[in-house]
Image (cartoon, helix red, strand yellow):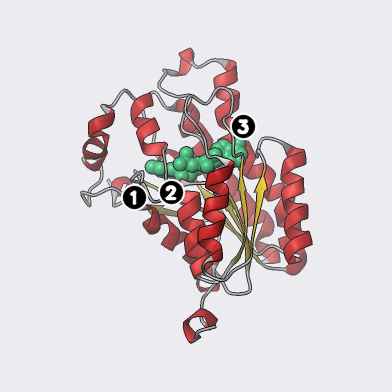
Amino acid sequence: MTGMETDAPLRRKTAVITGAARGLGRACAIRFAQEGADLVLVDVADDVAGVPYPLGSADQLEYTADLCRSHNVSVLTVVADIRDPVSVHRVAALALERFGTVHILLNNAGIAAPSGKAVHDIDEAEWDLMIGIDLTGAWRMMKAVVPTMIEQRSGSVINIASTAGLVGYRHFAGYVAAKHGLIGLTKAAALDYAPFRVRINALCPGSVRDDPVHEGRMLAEIARSLEVDVDEHEDIFVQSQPMNSLIEPHDVAGAAVWLAGDDSRQVTGTTLTVDGGFSAR
Ligand SMILES: NC(=O)c1ccc[n+]([C@@H]2O[C@H](COP(=O)([O-])OP(=O)(O)OC[C@H]3O[C@@H](n4cnc5c(N)ncnc54)[C@H](O)[C@@H]3O)[C@@H](O)[C@H]2O)c1
């Protein structure tokens, strides 16, 4: 073990990360591993009926795990759909069985579509699917994992929301409502758990580049939903970012490491934007 590894801010901590097969979940997993955390990597690892694009796969989840193990941390992968309470409780039980406790929960799993409709055109199933994954899934994971954190009187939950949790986007009401709800859930939970020193924060990325290394798909899928030209979508999304560049997955991972670690020990109930200034206007 090198000196640098000893100083790693997440050494001796265990983190559960949902949606870890690819994209931001993979980027955060790798960065958490670099910072010394043992990991429970969770993904549905299958397509979900009603989501009009492929989700992460079992191979991608195992690939993320291999990338993390190369940083000399222990990694457990669990295939679970965060819509299913039984599977979610199995995640918590397997994490406790393998690592004895959980210090960090990164609620990252999410979908961007079905979207692209005005509010009155969204049907019941589309609404339930969006809220069920992007809002209720995070609540369900907290319900399963936070009791362990209360018991040990420490823990950090990071809910990946979005700038869509702060402002509206046209023809994106389900996603916008879910992410606004996630920020509300974050604030309420922060108050519930502050006496136990369990911290709950939201992280709001702006438009994140679909980096091929992490195989993220969301920005292209948002473009497709909003009928933005997929070949030009990066240039179009850049125009809304005051710093004139897309967010990179490692920008989000760096903020997640800070929220996860002890340097942010007095930070709870906050909403941290990583959006190149988008929400400052
Ligand atoms: N990419 C962006 O521009 C952007 C911007 C703001 C916020 N976000 C948020 O960041 C998070 C990650 O997005 P991403 O860009 O990496 O997307 P992505 O589609 O590349 O990855 C999402 C992962 O979540 C998994 N997942 C989806 N539904 C699941 C379920 N029911 N149970 C378990 N796993 C499930 C998928 O299989 C996939 O591996 C999402 O919550 C998203 O809303 C993304």
Checking the image for residue 204, the label placed there is 2
Residue 162 visible to the viewer: no
Q: Nearer the viewer, residue 270 or 9?
A: 9
Residue 16 visible to the viewer: yes
**Number of residues whose C-alpha sits closer than 10 Å to that of mark 1, classed few (under 14), some (14–19) or many (20 or more):** many
Examine the image and state in which quarter residue 226 appears.
Answer: top left
Answer with mark 3 or mark 2, whichever residue precedes in sequence. Answer: 3
Q: Which residue is mark 1?
A: 275
**Could you give the CA–CA distance between mark 3 and mark 2, rounded to whole angstroms?**
19 Å
Checking the image for residue 225, the label placed there is none
- Asked if ligand 1 lies within 8 A of label 3, the reply is yes
Answer with mark 1 or mark 2, whichever residue precedes in sequence. Answer: 2
Please, what is the three-letter code of the amino acid marked with disc 2? Cys
Q: Is residue 25 left or right of residue 277?
A: right
Q: Is residue 169 left or right of residue 240?
A: right
- Asked if ligand 1 lies within 8 A of label 2, the reply is yes
Answer with mark 3 or mark 1, whichever residue precedes in sequence. Answer: 3
Please, what is the three-letter code of the amino acid marked with disc 3? Gly
Residue 70 location in percent, x, y?
A: 52, 66
**Could you give the CA–CA distance between mark 3 and mark 1, rounded to whole angstroms?**
25 Å
Please, what is the three-letter code of the amino acid marked with disc 1? Asp
Relative vertical location of residue 226 with respect to residue 65 in this rendering, above or below: above
**Numbered disc 2: secondary structure:** strand
Residue at screen point 26% across, 27% down: 229
Checking the image for residue 132, the label placed there is 3
Relative vertical location of residue 64 with respect to residue 12 in this rendering, above or below: above
**Number of residues whose C-alpha sits closer than 10 Å to that of mark 3, classed few (under 14), some (14–19) or many (20 or more):** some
